[in-house]
Image (cartoon, grey):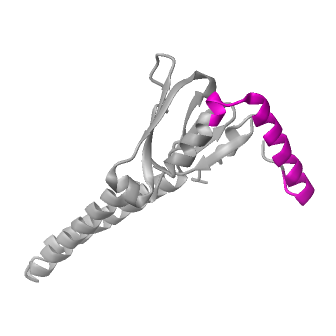
């Protein structure tokens, strides 16, 4: 009921999916720290309050409940957000209750780069910057991207690579899946 549509449902029959990922779990680190700190403060203050101030303790426990619910919502938002890259476009779906679909054609990409901080290198994420023909697109900056080197190489191949070899490779993958009895992608 509340789950958004699968991002693959937004793809056309003529598109082939190349990458399907969600952002790195490190995007939740600050939210986790914030929720844990707020819960610790609520518990500590509740413990220090005298029993006669039961109304104050009740309010603190409601605040703690709101903190937990907010964190659960943030985790759900992260879980349902998906980035799908096809041979024709980038598609990102977000939102728990209201689905938002962001799209950028691959043909508009003019420059591609990624940045990895020291923390990003240790944890395995980076930031991808996708520039298009003089415009700011909806997906021009993708933070907390897992395995950014692989993503960069794959997108570079799609944008700047040999289209004939890509078509042959896709046909070979499709034939291998058909031989194994799997449903072809795309």
Taking the image as shown, residue 123 lies to the left or right of residue 1, namely left
- Residue 52 magenta-drawn? no
**Closest to the observer: 47 or 157?**
157
- At a point 10% along the width and 76% down the height, the residue shown is 53
**Closest to the observer: 140 or 175?**
175
Q: Residue 10: x and y, percent? A: 68, 38
State the predominant SS element of the stretch in magenta.
helix
Q: Residue 172: x and y, percent? A: 85, 45
Residue range (magenta): 157-183
Taking the image as shown, residue 183 lies to the left or right of residue 2, namely right
Q: Is residue 30 above or below residue 169?
A: below
- At a point 54% along the width and 41% down the height, the residue shown is 152
The answer to whether any part of residue 83 appears in the image is: yes
Q: Is residue 134 above or below residue 112?
A: above
Q: Residue 91: x and y, percent? A: 59, 37
Q: Is residue 177 above or below residue 112?
A: below
Q: Residue 66: x and y, percent? A: 31, 62
Taking the image as shown, residue 166 lies to the left or right of residue 119, namely right
- At a point 22% along the width and 65% down the height, the residue shown is 38
Q: Quadrant of the C terminus?
A: top right
Image quadrant in which you'd find residue 28: bottom left
Q: Quadrant of the N terminus?
A: bottom right
- At a point 57% along the width and 31% down the height, the residue shown is 103
């Amino acid at each position: 009921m509340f789950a958004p549509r699968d991002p693959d449902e937004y793809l056309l029959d003529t598109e082939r999916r190349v990458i399907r990922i969600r952002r790195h779990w490190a995007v939740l680190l600050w939210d986790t720290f914030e929720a844990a700190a707020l819960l610790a403060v609520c518990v500590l203050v509740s413990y220090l309050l005298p029993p006669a101030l039961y109304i104050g303790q009740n309010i603190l426990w409601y605040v703690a409940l709101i903190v937990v619910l907010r964190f659960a919502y943030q985790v759900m938002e992260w879980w349902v957000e998906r980035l799908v890259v096809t041979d024709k476009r980038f598609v990102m779906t977000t939102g728990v209750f209201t689905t938002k679909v962001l799209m950028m054609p691959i043909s508009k990409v003019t420059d591609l780069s990624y940045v990895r901080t020291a923390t990003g290198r240790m944890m395995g994420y980076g930031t991808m910057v996708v520039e298009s023909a003089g415009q700011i697109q909806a997906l021009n900056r993708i933070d907390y991207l897992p395995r950014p080197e692989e993503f960069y190489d794959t997108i570079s191949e799609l944008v700047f690579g040999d289209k004939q070899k890509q078509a042959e490779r896709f046909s070979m993958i499709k034939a291998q899946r058909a031989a194994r009895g799997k449903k072809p992608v795309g």
